[in-house]
Amino acid sequence: MTWRAFAILGGAVALWAGAAAAQDDPAASFRQALALAKKGDRDAQCALGAMYHAGEGTAQDPAEAVRWYRKAAEQGQSTAQYRLALCLEQGDGIGRDASEAVR
């Protein structure tokens, strides 16, 4: 599954680089998402979490995915909140914590 499909299934965020560029170069999409995420864009942070989770445009890193999901979730990004809760419930990239998952 591509990160775009992963993001769509999780409640999609728009592609900033345009669909053609994103399809042709996941690494470029990753770099663009990272730049926006570092500036505090919550949708980019969520997308970055999905990219780390799926290993699209970067190496798969569940712990880094959780870090970005958390940043976006703290800003009220609902998809990130959901994805973070799943990670917490399943212990994916973070220790299992069912009580925090339901918060």
Image (cartoon, helix red, strand yellow):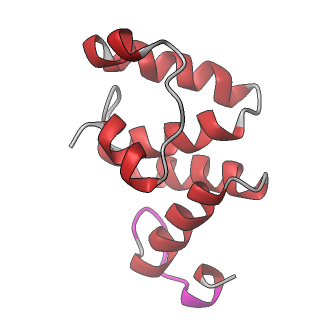
- What residue is shown at x 49% (from left), y 12% (from top)? 17
> Horizontal and vertical percent for residue 75?
79, 51
Query: Which quarter of the rendered picture does the N terminus lie within?
Result: top left
Q: In the picture provided, is 77 more to the left or to the right than 82?
A: right
Within the image, what quadrant is residue 103 found in? bottom right
> Residue at image x 43%, y 62%?
93
Asked if residue 55 can be seen in this view, the reply is: no
Q: Is residue 17 magenta?
A: no
Q: Position of residue 90 (x, y in %)?
A: 39, 77
Magenta-highlighted residues: 92-99
Q: Residue at x 33, y 20 (%)?
A: 26
Where residue 67 appears, x then y in whole percent? Answer: 59, 51
Pick the residue in front: 21 or 58. 21
Compared to 89, does 33 lie above or below? above
| Residue 16, image x, y percentages | 54, 18
* Image height of 71 relative to 48, above or below: below
Most common secondary structure along the magenta stretch = loop
Snapshot quadrant of residue 45: top right
Relative to residue 16, is residue 48 depicted above or below? below
Front-most of 61 and 16? 16
User: What residue appears at the point 76 percent right and 33 percent down from the top-left corner?
Assistant: 40
The quarter of the picture where residue 78 lies is: bottom right
Regarding residue 91, the answer to whether it shows in the image is yes
Lateral position of residue 103 relative to residue 52, left or right: right
Total labels drawn: 0
Q: Would residue 102 appear left or right of 25 to someone viewing this image?
A: right
Instruction: Tell me, yes or no, whether the highlighted magenta stretch contains residue 95.
Output: yes
The residue nearer to you, when weighing 36 against 22, is 22
Q: Residue furthest left?
A: 1
Question: Is residue 87 placed above or below 11 in the rendered structure?
Answer: below
